[in-house]
């Protein structure tokens, strides 16, 4: 399968997300609960003019069974970018598997795995493209 480059709009949204995450981290620092960062990043993205939803239910369909609220996306930005937020000392490989599954099931191409429990925010942001 050929790799399809992200659109200019997706790249614009990505840049705003990274900048907003850095802004939140600079203001709050590490060591808080994930939910605090989620609320603050949601607020910061809204201030920057992006539509952002929190705790979006993502149904899973298997065979003839539908699990209506099987997964929850931490943040869905502009209905195109998924942000999975963490506040943890150690990033486990299952977190990457989680965002990859979310992207695949939501039929989205771009996501961010963002860990706010780091001294430098640039070390806590993983951009994921499928």
Image (tube, rainbow, N blue to C red):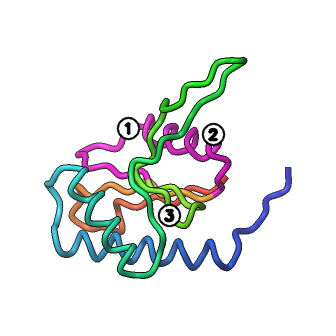
Is residue 99 or residue 46 the one in the foreground?
A: 46
Q: Quadrant location of residue 21?
A: bottom left
Q: Which residues are magenta?
A: 84-109
Dot 2: what SS?
Answer: helix
Mark 1: which secondary structure?
loop
Residue drawn 31% across the image and 49% down it:
86
Query: What SS does tag 3 mark?
Result: strand
* Residue 92: mark: 1
The answer to the question of whether label 1 and label 2 lie on touching residues, with beta carbons closer than 8 A, is no
Residue at horizontal 44%, vertical 37%? 93
Residue 106, given in percent of the width and then of the height, sits at 62, 45
Which residue sits furthest top? Answer: 64
Q: Residue at x 51, y 55 (%)?
A: 82
**Is 43 left or right of 33, judged from the image as shown?**
right
Q: Residues within 10 Å of mark 3 (few under 14, many from 20)?
A: many
- Up-down: is 42 above or below 114? below
**Which label number is shown at residue 41?**
none
Q: Where is mark 2, residue-wise?
A: 105
Foreground: 76 or 104? Answer: 76
Figure check: 58 above or below 130: above
Q: What is the tally of numbered marks visible in this picture?
A: 3
Q: Does residue 40 show up magenta in the picture? A: no
Q: Name which of mark 1 and mark 2 comes first in the sequence.
A: 1
Task: Determine if the magenta segment contains residue 99.
Answer: yes
> Which residue, given by chain and number where applicable, does mark 3 sit on?
77
Provide residue 29's location: percent of width, then percent of height: 16, 66
């Amino acid at each position: 399968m050929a790799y399809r480059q992200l659109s200019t709009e997706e790249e614009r949204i990505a840049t705003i997300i990274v900048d907003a995450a850095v802004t939140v981290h600079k203001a709050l620092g590490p060591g808080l609960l994930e939910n605090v960062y989620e609320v603050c990043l949601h607020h910061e993205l809204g201030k920057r003019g992006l539509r952002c939803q929190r705790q979006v239910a993502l149904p899973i369909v298997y065979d003839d069974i539908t699990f209506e609220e099987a997964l929850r996306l931490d943040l869905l930005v502009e209905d195109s970018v998924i942000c999975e937020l963490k506040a943890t000392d150690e990033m486990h490989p299952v977190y990457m598997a989680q965002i990859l599954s979310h992207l695949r099931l939501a039929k989205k191409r771009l996501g961010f795995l963002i860990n706010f429990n780091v001294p430098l925010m640039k070390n806590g942001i993983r951009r994921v493209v499928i």
